[in-house]
Image (spheres, rainbow, N blue to C red):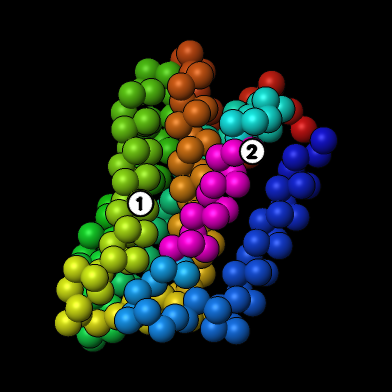
Amino acid sequence: MKYRNVIAVLVGLWLTSAVTAGALGVFKNALGGLALPVGVAAMVPVTIFLVWFAASARFRQYLYGLNPLSLTLAHAWRVNGLVFLILSSYGLLPWLFSLPAGLGDMAIGITAPWAARRLVNGEHKGAFIFWQLLGVLDLVAAIALGTTARLIDPSAPGMDPMTVLPLSLVPTFFVPLLLMIHVVSIAQARRWQGHGYSRLGEQAPFAAR
């Protein structure tokens, strides 16, 4: 199976669906500003991925062969978490969500190039996995706080900006995609013996296609 092609098609369909749903207002809801539809949209793709990852040895083998440098650098875009802080300063998002989510994203985004350069080898496997787990914690906390912020503080601004384009793509596409990348990176690191990667785009020789 050409997993590269299959994944490209599935990700393309997923992105198209997320854009279409956002444009049609699917993620808007009348539940007092709660972002439950967004939370569901974020978790469904992750659940499907985890089931596929657990059930298919060939799929896992393909993912093990992806370049960990490239996967780690994909998190650099998370420096854009600054946008959450800016929106909260204008009263458009609750600080309960934007402060941990924004600062957490920025911390992971800023350190991603360092992690890719210094930690992607067997000698630093523990530190690399720890960094990945911090990234997972940031994403999970953002989803949890985003869906419950109005329950915790009913007087706070709602999550409305995150339910319409372009920001609706953050929780419905980019967050779950990056969460999957974290899972793959951790799974890869657990298999490291001491081999390092020196080129972006390099694949391990055992990568299944």
Determine if residue 83 is in view: yes
Q: Quadrant of residue 160?
A: bottom left
Which label number is shown at residue 52? 2
Residue 103, percent from left and from top: 24, 60
By secondary structure, the bulk of the magenta-drawn segment is best described as helix
Residue visible at 42% across and 53% down in the picture? 76
Could you tell me which secondary element the residue under label 2 belongs to? helix
Residue 170, percent from left and from top: 46, 66
Could you tell me which secondary element the residue under label 1 belongs to? helix
For badge 2, the amino acid type reads: Trp
Task: Mark 2: give few (<14), some (14-19) or many (20+) Cα within 10 Å.
Answer: few
Determine if residue 88 is in view: no
Q: Quadrant of the C terminus?
A: top right
**What residue range appears in magenta?**
39-52
Does residue 132 show up magenta in the picture? Answer: no
Q: Quadrant of the N terminus?
A: top right
Q: Is residue 36 above or below residue 116?
A: below
Residue visible at 43% across and 63% down in the picture? 39
Residue 134, percent from left and from top: 30, 42
